[in-house]
Image: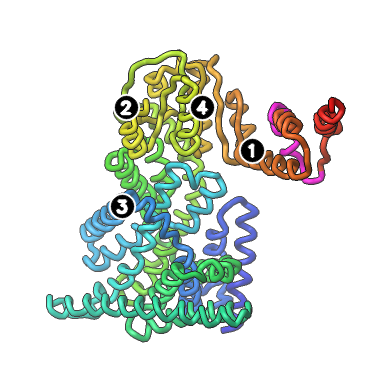
Amino acid sequence: MYAELLVVIAAAALGGALFERLRLPAVVGFLVTGAVVGPGGLALVSDPERVRALAEFGVAFLLFEIGLELPLDELRRHGRTALLSGALQVAVSIAAVAALGVATGLRVESAVVVGMLVAMSSTALVMRILGQRGEVDAPHGRLALGILLFQDLCIVPFLLAVPLLAGEVPREPGPLALAVVTAVAKLGLLYGVARFALPWVLERVARLRSPDLFSLFAFLLAMGSAVVAREIGLTLAVGAFIGGLVLAASPYAAQLFAEVAPLRGVLLGIFFTAVGMLLEPAYALAVWPGVLVYVGGVIAFKAVVIVAIVALVLRWSLRIAVQTGLSLAQTGEFSFVLAMPAASAGLIGGDLPQIFVAGSILTLVATPFLIRGSAWLARRLAASGALPEVRSEEPSGHAIIVGFGLAGRTLARVLTASGIPYRIVEANPRTVEEARRLGEPIVFGDATRPSILEHVGIRQARLVSIAINDPEATLSAIEVVRAIAPEVPVVARSRYARDLDRFVEQGASEVVTDEFESAIDLFSKVLRRFDVTPPAIAHFADLLREEGYELLRGPAGLRLDPWLAEILEEEQEGPEEEA
């Protein structure tokens, strides 16, 4: 067992490093190298049962960490959107895939399980890619997060449904109802005991003030909740997830996460590499038509379903709908978690396990390219005018504010106080409704579409301010403004320094970068503490902005230009000399 574990960790490290070097997700590297060293490849781990044991070990810790990290506050904040979009996506996916499965000859129970597998997307991969692209706070990033959170919470009922679908309980109404009630009661009992026992134990351990003991008990609780769950008839995965979920609400959640987070790479590596070992490359090649159908079907089906929900039910723009749909068009880690007990219970057999594993790996490989291409595709589809737009009267000599988040609202208040007219374009229908109730001159629409900007008077505008969190949408909006009204100044906001040059090259007149402005705010406060005068600081900060933040963008060892240092000295000496 020790040798196999060492092989898994070594394969995960090598595969992750190789794929990161190729600018592909490490998760995919884990899966591919697992297939290479597993029973179907080099057979460095030749016993399939040991592979499943390793995968179960990885699943338990992975789900404990996910439960601990699950942002329930975020779910509550976007609860309505997450519940509606997530529930519709999961329900439609299961129903449609199950119906197709039955039509192609699968048993109803097997078809339902396949629907569950297809319904799940990869939280670990999608959120990492969106984070790297700075799009987590973009509208499609928030929508994707809400749907992913709902999917993650569905894993518990899905796992509990496996023994029922496998026929381990008689299908008569009485025994079936009894089994459901018993499963729910066990789940409630586990949650209740964990809710009171786990924080109590951690409180006593924390009083000992021993970091080593706290770390030890963190892992003891993870495995303990998993083992207890299995002993009462649930699964390791359910127990670990419940344990993490309970402790996430405790005062010790931050420290627990600090103990577990450094091992996240190990946990993901062990789990995905063990899953990859379940793939038999020769077998997958023999059933390649089924694999290709699975890949194409999953990507197309999930993208279309999510686009329809976001655009037609939630009434977001087509651009945001397409970006959200393509972000989630894969099967994810929880699909593998569910597939293992389903295969053991005989719910998926024959060619299906290999088609599922091989096809899922390929959908994960395709995900970075789909997300990168989604912005381009969304612009092309949005330009076709597929959605109705809200029209407004045509003003003149005004400012146009694109995005009505915190930055947009603050700008609107300042313009109101200054007596400057403005119009707002916002893609979130709920935000539009709330702003209209407050009397704001706002229209619902996508600012990357020329007709929307025409409706708010782009040709007669005095300035356009783009204050959204989506860098790709900002680039598109700048491009559209420049095409329609090349003389109108564009002031764009970027969260990250890396987007500044792209915005300027696209045609932005000025770019306000959150990272740089926070740095300026930081050194301004520090210099005040060292008695540098406010005029000197203000002049210095203005010069930095005029120079395009060049000093702040330089390498770590770059020293301050002498003439900039002289500015501080001159401004500082001026008042003293006058005195």
Q: Nearer the viewer, mark 1 or mark 3?
A: 1
Q: Nearer the viewer, mark 2 or mark 4?
A: 4
Residue 538 locus on image (x, y percent): 71, 31
Residue 407 is marked as: none
How far apart, in angstroms, are the residues tagged by discs 2 and 1?
Answer: 35 Å
Check the image and report above or below for 273 versus 556.
below
**Region in magenta:** 543-557
Picture colour scheme: rainbow
Task: Give the SS element for disc 4.
Answer: strand
Is residue 554 found inside the magenta-colored segment of the image?
yes
Do labels 2 and 4 touch, CB within 8 Å? no
Quick one: label 4 or label 3, which is nearer the N terminus? 3
Check the image and report above or below for 282 versus 561.
below
Residue 357 locus on image (x, y percent): 43, 63
Find residue 43 and report its image quarter: bottom right
Task: Give the SS element for disc 3.
Answer: helix
Q: What residue is drawn where x is 31% and y is 33%? A: 437
Query: What amino acid type is highlighted by mark number 4?
Result: Ser
Check the image and report above or below for 167 versus 374.
below
Quick one: label 1 or label 4, which is nearer the N terminus? 4
Residue at the disc numbered 3? 89
Task: Answer few, some or many: residues within 10 Å of disc 2's Cα (few below 14, many 20 plus, some between 14 and 19).
Answer: some
With 346 as the anchor, is 179 left or right in this view? left
Do labels 2 and 1 touch, CB within 8 Å? no
How far apart, in angstroms, are the residues tagged by discs 2 and 4?
Answer: 21 Å
Along the line of sight, which residue is nearer the eye, 314 or 353? 314
Query: What amino acid type is highlighted by mark number 2?
Result: Glu
How far apart, in angstroms, are the residues tagged by discs 1 and 3?
Answer: 40 Å
Residue 465 is marked as: 4
With 436 as the anchor, is 33 left or right in this view? right
Residue 35 appears in the rendering: no
Residue at the disc numbered 1? 517
